[in-house]
């Protein structure tokens, strides 16, 4: 990558060559060498320098879907044009205008205009044409010609796209109907599988890595630490697309149980049994239940918070989120941070117009929370269901009644369509049928979710639960301890909301207590008054607002 992209402008005009192949296999031909030679000769004849240090090459990126602009080298070049980092009078050489864009003609011409208006000449190697402001002013019909080329390129890609989508749709429908069991190329297939020309096969060492990654996730490990542990075992998942934060996406993939999800123009197909499974259906369902109570986060903070960053901590005065505020710039020489420099901060705090909660140390809040949950009696109370699941049953029954109603409506429309002997089905009927199918899918997903939740009702924590809290609480006193990741997950598994009144239940700038209201996932509420220095707690007055 040249200094052009990093921000250092060159003074003299230069020549740049742009290559794009929608299929990487095209790069193995002679067209790349031919264009490079053309660019070198073109620049040499005019006394210009071909900038070969800037790699303007996009392989496997579609110009129809604009992937080469969104994530490719052409996008970087266009940004450099916008920022004035391409010298005036420079030249961009392409094989043809269809290499620049196959988007809708207006969009494609706007991209060409963006380059030309920046004082850059576009040269097409296939026909030797040159497009710049002076040339187009003298020969306006060249602009019309460029538009016709772009129209043709877009129509070719649009037709191809429609044919490909229709083919994929037929294959998916065949798979669902059981009449087709071959390969369907759409999207990226899991990298723990290989295709031998006849069937998919698991790659044992990669499957082992996937299962270990899932186990780390279930243990509450953060993405960064999980990636480190995988690397320690020799699993370099980044080589095949799963590492770091992608573990959060991995655990949700239906491919784990052998299914492939394909979407074609808004129509979703779930192809059961497409891949050999890594997990059984029961293991996969248990994993999905765990993901519903786990709050994924991108990256890992230097200090793992036990109550913040989970989406459950709120200010008691204004109701907005409470976040961590670690003053790491004031860390001691050994890397530790004073209790007063690890704080909870209301996101709406403002001295003039916003919430007056200000901030408080997070340490006493964490101490009180861990101390409370380390007592088995307290923990049992938190985990005791508020009712016997009656509300869940009522919601599930209502969902099933709605599902049955939608199925009846869909059946009536289907019968009407089958009975219609006029030929093409009325568009309004087809549209309504699709809307009902989409609604039915949502209701089925909701019913499955409620059934899983109903299965959890009545589950209680074993006596070892409080012992685990106590053990991890001791280890977590070291703010760099891996135990904090596990405690973080325990907090999320146990509580649905933590409300913090930083200056006491009735706000007082001189208050010596922090008032907490803890709401467990079972629906139980606990109020604690926490000494803002020591973290010692006592039962306080509950606030039900």
Image (spheres, rainbow, N blue to C red):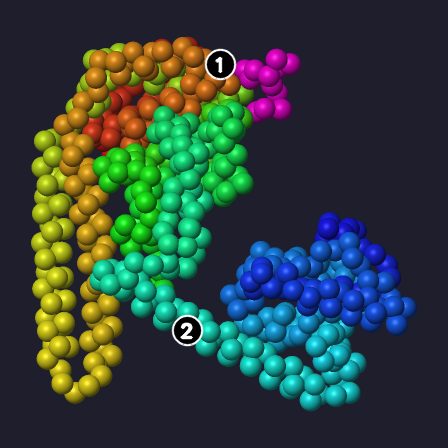
Q: Position of residue 298 (x, y in %)?
A: 48, 38
Q: Position of residue 509 (x, y in %)?
A: 44, 23
Looking at the image, residue 32 sits to the left or right of residue 457; the answer is right
| Mark 1 and mark 2: Cα distance apart in space | 58 Å
Q: Which quadrant of the structure image shows residue 406?
A: bottom left
Q: Is residue 9 visible?
A: yes
Residue ID for mark 1? 478
Q: Is residue 323 visible?
A: no
Q: Residues within 10 Å of mark 2 (few under 14, many from 20)?
A: few
**Res 162 label:** 2
404 and 209: which is toward the camera: 209
Q: Is residue 178 above or below residue 129?
A: above
Identified at 45% across, 45% down, the residue is 191
Looking at the image, residue 121 sits to the left or right of residue 265; the answer is right
Which residues lie in the magenta part?
A: 327-339
Q: Is residue 36 above or below residue 528?
A: below
Q: Residues within 10 Å of mark 1 (few under 14, many from 20)?
A: few
Identified at 34% across, 11% down, the residue is 470
Q: Nearer the viewer, mark 1 or mark 2?
A: 2
Q: Look at the numbered disc 1 and give the secondary structure of its residue.
A: loop
Q: Position of residue 443 (x, y in %)?
A: 19, 53
Identified at 69% across, 89% down, the residue is 141
Q: Is residue 263 above or below residue 154?
A: above
Q: Look at the numbered disc 2 and give the secondary structure of its residue.
A: helix
Instruction: Tell me, yes or no, whether the highlighted magenta stretch contains residue 335.
Output: yes
Q: Position of residue 402 (x, y in %)?
A: 12, 56
Which comes sooner in the sequence, label 1 or label 2?
2
From the image, give the main secondary structure of the stretch colored magenta: loop
Instruction: Tell me, yes or no, whether the highlighted magenta stretch contains residue 8.
Output: no
Q: Which quadrant of the structure image shows residue 385?
A: top left
């Amino acid at each position: 990558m040249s200094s052009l992209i990093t921000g250092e402008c060159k003074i003299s005009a230069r020549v740049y060559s742009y290559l794009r192949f929608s299929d990487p296999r095209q790069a193995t031909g002679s067209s790349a060498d031919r264009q490079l030679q053309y660019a070198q000769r073109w620049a040499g004849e005019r006394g210009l320098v071909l900038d070969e240090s800037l790699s303007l090459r996009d392989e496997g990126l579609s110009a129809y879907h604009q992937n080469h602009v969104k994530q490719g080298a052409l996008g970087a070049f266009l940004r450099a044009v916008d920022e004035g980092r391409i010298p005036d009078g420079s030249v961009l050489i392409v094989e043809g205008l269809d290499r620049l864009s196959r988007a809708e003609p207006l969009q494609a011409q706007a991209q060409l205009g963006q380059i030309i208006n920046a004082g850059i000449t576009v040269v097409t190697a296939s026909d030797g044409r040159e497009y710049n402001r002076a040339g187009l002013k003298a020969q306006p019909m060249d602009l019309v010609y460029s538009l016709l080329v772009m129209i043709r390129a877009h129509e070719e890609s649009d037709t191809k796209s429609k044919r490909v989508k229709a083919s994929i749709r037929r294959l998916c429908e065949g798979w669902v109907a059981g009449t087709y069991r071959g390969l369907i190329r759409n999207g990226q297939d899991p990298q723990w599988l290989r295709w031998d020309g006849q069937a998919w096969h698991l790659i044992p060492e990669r499957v082992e890595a996937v299962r270990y990654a899932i186990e780390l996730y279930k243990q509450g490990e953060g993405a960064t630490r999980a990636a480190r542990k995988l690397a320690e075992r020799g699993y370099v998942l980044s080589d095949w697309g799963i590492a770091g934060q992608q573990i959060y996406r991995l655990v949700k993939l239906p491919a784990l149980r052998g299914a492939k999800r394909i979407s074609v123009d808004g129509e979703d197909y779930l192809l059961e049994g497409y891949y050999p499974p890594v997990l059984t259906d029961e293991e996969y369902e248990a994993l999905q239940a765990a993901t519903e109570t786990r709050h994924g986060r991108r990256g890992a903070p230097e200090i793992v918070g036990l109550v913040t960053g989970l989406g459950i901590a709120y200010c008691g005065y204004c109701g907005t989120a409470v976040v961590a505020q670690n003053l790491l710039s004031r860390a001691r020489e050994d890397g530790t941070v004073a209790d007063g420099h690890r704080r909870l901060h209301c996101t709406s705090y403002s001295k003039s117009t916003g919430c007056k909660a200000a901030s408080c140390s997070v340490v006493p809040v964490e101490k009180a929370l861990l101390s409370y949950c380390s007592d088995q009696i307290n923990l049992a109370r938190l985990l005791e269901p508020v009712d016997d699941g009656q509300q869940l049953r009522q919601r599930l029954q209502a969902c099933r009644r709605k599902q049955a109603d939608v199925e009846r409506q869909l059946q009536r429309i289907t019968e009407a369509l089958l009975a219609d002997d006029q030929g093409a089905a009325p568009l309004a009927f087809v549209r309504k049928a699709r809307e009902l199918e989409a609604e039915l899918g949502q209701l089925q997903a909701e019913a499955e979710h409620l059934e899983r939740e109903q299965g959890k009702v009545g589950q209680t924590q074993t006596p070892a639960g409080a012992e685990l809290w106590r053990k991890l609480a001791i280890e977590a006193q070291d703010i760099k301890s891996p135990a904090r990741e596990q405690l973080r997950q325990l907090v999320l598994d146990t509580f649905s909301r933590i409300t913090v009144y930083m200056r006491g239940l009735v706000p007082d700038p001189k208050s010596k207590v922090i008032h907490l209201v803890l709401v467990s996932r079972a629906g139980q509420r606990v109020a604690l008054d926490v000494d803002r220095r020591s973290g010692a707690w006592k039962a306080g007055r509950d606030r039900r607002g």
